[in-house]
Image: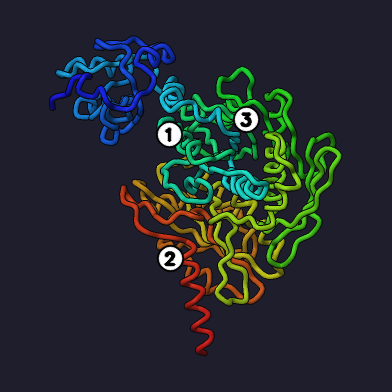
Amino acid sequence: MTHVTHAADADRAAGPTLARLAEIAGAELVHAPRADWPVASVSLDSAAVEPGGLFAALPGTRVHGARYAFDSAAGAILTDREGLAIIAGTPDTRPVLVVDDVRRVLGEVAAEVYGWASKSMKLIGVTGTSGKTTTTYLLERGLTAAGCSVGLIGTTGTRIKGVDVPTALTTPEAPTLQALFARMAREGVTHVVMEVSSHALMLGRVGGTLFDAAGFTNLSQDHLDFHPTMEDYFEAKALFFDPASPLHAERSVICVDDEWGERMARVARNPVTVGTRGQAGVDVAATQLGADDSGAQEVELVLGDATYEFTLPLPGAFNVANAALAVALAAEVGVDPEAFISGLSEASVPGRMQRIDRGQDFVAVVDYAHKPAAVAAVLDTLRGQVSGRVGVVLGAGGDRDASKRPVMGREAAARADLVIVTDDNPRTEDPAAIRAAVLEGAREAAGAGVEIREVGHRGEAIDQLVAWALPGDAVIVVGKGHEVGQIVGTTTHHFDDREEMARALEARVHRIGGE
């Protein structure tokens, strides 16, 4: 492949110069006859980099990204010493910015290329183990009701003023994220709410992002395949709140309903604390006043000298905490709480305690819970809603934290009358081995009268769950929520728990109606 000279691309869009990017990154500039050459885009994908853009070549688990640099359309390359050595072994003569750690500088480099768009909007980030998606959806709904133009980035994708924009990761990689901010700013977004994962904090995805406020939901066992210990997991989250961290937000709002929240409040500087368990001394307190048969809750929230009462259509004590956190975060960025709260009565979150109703005489729910504490919380919520029995279908993902599998089984069997263990996303692991680990925990915790089943096919497991239910019972499928694919090996097959639950319910209602 022959690479054209800089002069041939002289009419392309202007951006920061290579010299400026080298200054920001602390990079050595190699093969750069023109340090004033402008860069208008950045990409981690060699196949997607725009002609003349900057290709960020990272070391990978199997191969270094610099091996793909020569065949890319990039005008310049950002890489480390290993990457430079690889490039030096090719005929490539394009400029190379060389740094010790590409991820450490990539966020600020991308922010410079895309004009530091996060400075022009109010940016709210939410982190924690559970509740990130729900809290960001509540923020989106409340901010919109308060007259803001809102962008949302998270597990279920990205939305700009209510319009879906596909993205692949909970927190996109830094170049994608900064380009999204620039697009949102161009389209008139005033407030951005986004989930911030521990991976994003550790891998530099939010470097160069200027957060006005950071919210913390809770911490429980998850991602111990990535973080060696819970302490390491906590320290990753703390990067968002510790004033000594370059990633910390300007303001912190922390739910102190668990011990990790209490610890995080001690890490942060002057945090706003949120509590729903009657704690003394919190800045924002919320209490459930009552709930109806659908799970909708009447909530009282005290913020400063003001008391607000509102209807929250989402069930569960954990959602009272999520709503309180959302209100407090909005208030911290200057939004009127009363105007914000007016939007919460219409909130919904795809795949989070989502009821599926096809005329059946029992409660049927789909939820994303795929961590032990989340499984426990959703089952406790269902138990409080119905007078009958509770049944659950669950599994565990392959190539992920294996230590939580028996714990998930134990939490389910301690709360449900029927536990059906099935496949989730087995990926490259043996599905039967994953099920065996979940079953081990379930059988340890199962009391008298608790039934444990193993059904490998997820659709068949849902069929059995629905067939088991009697009037007044509640059944729930957990683990996938909004997801519409099941990963077996390296192939993703279409599978949507909501569709499968609806199908099973319709078949049951039709069958009973014909009897």
Name the residue carrying label 1. Answer: 179
Mark 2 vs mark 1, foreground winner is: 1
Q: Is residue 409 left or right of residue 265?
A: left
The one of 277 and 393 positioned closer to us in this rendering? 277
Q: Which mark is residue 212?
A: 3
Q: Position of residue 328 (x, y in %)?
A: 72, 39
User: Residue at left 66%, top 48%?
Assistant: 142
- Report the amino acid beneath label 1: Ala
Q: Is residue 336 left or right of residue 232?
A: right
Residue 258 shows in this picture: no
Look at the picture and state if 7 lies above or below 195: above
CB within 8 Å, label 2 to label 1: no
Q: Which mark is residue 459?
A: 2
Q: Position of residue 463 (x, y in %)?
A: 47, 70
| Label 2 SS | helix
Q: Position of residue 276 (x, y in %)?
A: 76, 44
- Report the amino acid beneath label 2: Gly
Residue 112 quadrant? top left
